[in-house]
Amino acid sequence: MLSLPGLRLSGPVLVHGRVLLRPPAYSDHGPWAALRAESRTFLAPWEPEWPPDDLARHAWKDRMRRYRADVAQGTGLPFFIFIDGGNELAGGINIGHIRRGVSQSGQIGYWMGARHAGQGLMLDALNALLPHAFGPLGLHRLEAACIPDNKRSIGVLEKAGFQREGLLRSYLKIAGQWRDHFLYARIGDGAKTNGA
């Protein structure tokens, strides 16, 4: 069990295009908090309301405990997205709500810092993650939900081979309001990726 500052969660390091994905480390708090703070206005329309202490170190430790528990239970796999050879944090991506048995599925969630948005980095991140999800992780289906107004997210999902399956009414409380979401999914197909 990881509990010392500077250590990172166990998990693979994945690379595709301009991005490197690796599990979060305790030492990532500073860069993570700075990027989230500078991107708050950009991210607010697409995310749940942030608790007042969301960027505080004690909240970071709680977040790392949740990440660690998800990894240990096999229900989640978090990654941070780095650029510049792994030196600059650009965003985050995770597979959560992993279900085994007859489902073998999970849900993708992601965010990108404002200054890194619109550069194709999230597509690179998805193309790094998909072969791992459908290969070593053994998942058959990945789902993602996005607000119908989030044209960038829709574009990324569709470029990565996700298909829209329907509308989830009042699915998540985002920016203080219950919002409809489009449901997207991708079925494992031998880990083919767009642009790979």
Image: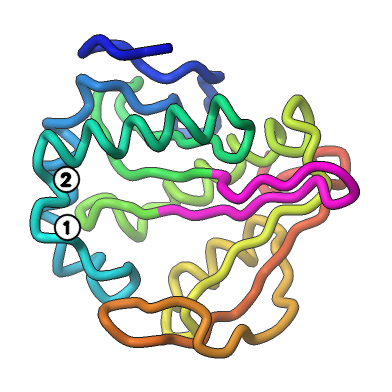
Q: Is residue 38 magenta?
A: no
Which residue was labeled with disc 1?
39
Which residue was labeled with disc 2?
35
In the displayed structure, would residue 26 be above or below residue 185? above
134 relative position to 16: left or right: right
> Where does the magenta region start and end?
95-110
64 relative position to 128: left or right: left
Q: Quadrant of residue 14?
A: top right
Q: Is residue 106 magenta?
A: yes
**In the image, what residue type sits under mark 1?**
Ser
Asked whether the beta carbons under mark 2 and mark 1 sit within 8 Å of each other, the answer is: yes
- What colour scheme was applied to this rendering of the protein? rainbow
Q: Residue at x 64, y 86 (%)?
A: 167
Q: Residue at x 35, y 31 (%)?
A: 65
Horizontal and vertical percent for residue 166?
71, 83
* Count of residue discs: 2
Seen from the viewer's position, the closer of residues 163 and 29 is: 29
Seen from the viewer's position, the closer of residues 1 and 191 is: 1
Q: Residues within 10 Å of mark 1 (few under 14, many from 20)?
A: some
Q: Quadrant of residue 25?
A: top left
In the displayed structure, would residue 73 be above or below residue 123? above
Q: Residues within 10 Å of mark 2 (few under 14, many from 20)?
A: some
The N terminus, quarter of image: top left
Horizontal and vertical percent for residue 104?
81, 45
**In the image, what residue type sits under mark 2?**
Leu
Horizontal and vertical percent for residue 142?
70, 54
Q: Residue at x 67, y 50 (%)?
A: 106
In the displayed structure, would residue 66 be above or below residue 51? above
The C terminus, quarter of image: top right
Q: CA distance from mark 2 to mark 1?
A: 6 Å
